[in-house]
Amino acid sequence: MKNRCKNFPTFLALLQIFLCHLAYAQDLVAPLFNQGIALYSQRDFLGASEYLGQVCDMAPNNTQARFYLAYSLIAIRKFDEAFRHAEILCGQDPQNQQYFALRDQIQKTISASRAVRPSSSGRYSLVPKEAKVSESPNLTKPPPTNPPRERTELDGALDAFDSQNFASASEILDAIIAKDPKNAKALHYRGMVESQQGKYSDARPWFEKAISVKPDMFETFFLLGETLMKEEKLKEAETTFAKAIAIKEDVFALINFAEVKKRLGKMNDAVELYNKALKIDGNVVEAKLNLADVTLDQGKVQEAAQVVNEVLTSDPANSFAHFIKGKILYSGNLIDDSIAELKQAISGSGDNSYYKTFLAKVYLGSGRGNEALEIGNDLLKDDPNSWDARLILAEGLLLNGEVANAQEHAEQAEKVKRSPDLFKLKAKIARRSGNNEKAQEMFKACISSDPKNGQNYLEFALFLEETGDQPFAVEVYKEIKSKFPESIFAVQAQAKLDSFPSVNPPPLSSPPKPNPQGKSLY
């Protein structure tokens, strides 16, 4: 007991030294994290990895820093280190499928990179769509050795935010804003707190207030644009990203802006924006693949296939590339091959709901309603408000002849939003109910709301054929050729026109005269 008491002062001294070092390290975490994220957003992945690595050393439980550290290491081809950090993330949060998807994708990339192939196979690029960026102190490498600046209330709020203690972060930020209602940084971070919890409608007013105080904050416009996208407020998102781009032509802002344009049916604008992003950095695989996806939706299959094949040559594990390849195969009616590619994309992306939705559409298009219903039920279980799930379930039930139940799901979907796909579904329900007039009305509404989608025109023309209105079907096929030249839609329309005798009658000739004697007619 005496020895224990004798050593106790030494223990206290060591503990005091440890706590001092810990406090000093905690003071550095927030500025180092902010600088690392700022470098990440500027695509200085080497610099970002150095700063974020120090954050992880000082604050091992900072999962956000470790997440972006892993991506930074991927970008500079340090795959083994990236994999180690992804493993740590999986252990820290076993419920987060995003971490497992990241780990699995790195593992596949490591395996692929060790395979025998030319060394000039291309630089690997796996960068998340967004980086949450905050205005950060002007730190320079290496980190400063001077004593840290005096901590502020805002630092405390950021510490709480980083540790995902959102209630505490909100409380501190609310106190700051109460004293200084025009504190743009506090307003910005207050929006981030809500956004991080998925409360997008609550986040939006905070971002808007921050912009009203400081209208040149690119990061706030960027996050507001993403918030509006998630709320399906696409027109407002379009305006917001335009303002963000006016401040700074950032690659990821351009990609998100293009996605908004695509979802609004403005395909040519989307193509222009993706190309602009690629001019800034031609190695951004996400921009390449999104551009391929848009060109595929425009019916330009060969262009899309070329890009996808190039990406898969250098990055065989890329889930998005496998997804687009699945869409290409489906457009060629190679159903089983399409399903295999889509399943590979889903497996490599942690059960991506967007990929699962398209797989369900493939099942529906090939008459496999029960498999589509299984996906629809899974999606609805994950998100009871899922609009896509409602449409899948409605069409699957329609295939099985359950018209009333299909109608119920369509009505639930309409409460969330109206869209071309919903109009098309209502057309199919009306057709199945024998109301062809209503079906035609819904098809016209579908085309009117998305006039640059050739697939909708084709489905309308097929409906007209089925219901016996061949003259109108011919008009639609001709319109497809005019509106979508050099596309797969035009090829399919021409094939249909060629099959109509009334459109392409055989050459006229005199009817043969009876020739009972078997004499030559000429």
Image (cartoon, helix red, strand yellow):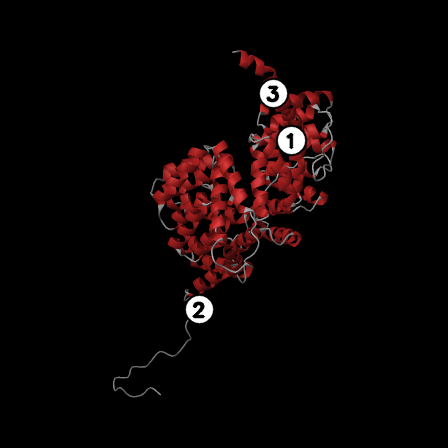
Percent across and percent down for residue 115 are 47, 55
Q: Earlier in the sequence, mark 3 or mark 2?
A: 3
Q: Is residue 80 left or right of residue 38?
A: left
SS state under label 2:
loop
- Of residue 26 and residue 498, the one placed in the foreground of this image is 26
Where does label 3 land, which residue?
A: 15
Q: Quadrant of the C terminus?
A: bottom left
Q: Residue flagged by tag 2: what amino acid is it?
A: Asn
Q: Residue flagged by tag 1: what amino acid is it?
A: Val
Where does label 1 land, which residue?
A: 29
Where does label 2 land, which residue?
A: 504
Q: CA distance from mark 3 to mark 1?
A: 21 Å
Q: Residue flagged by tag 3: what amino acid is it?
A: Leu
Residue 114 position (above or below residue 521): above
Q: Residue at x 66, y 32 (%)?
A: 207
- Furthest residue toward left: 517
Q: Nearer the viewer, mark 3 or mark 2?
A: 3
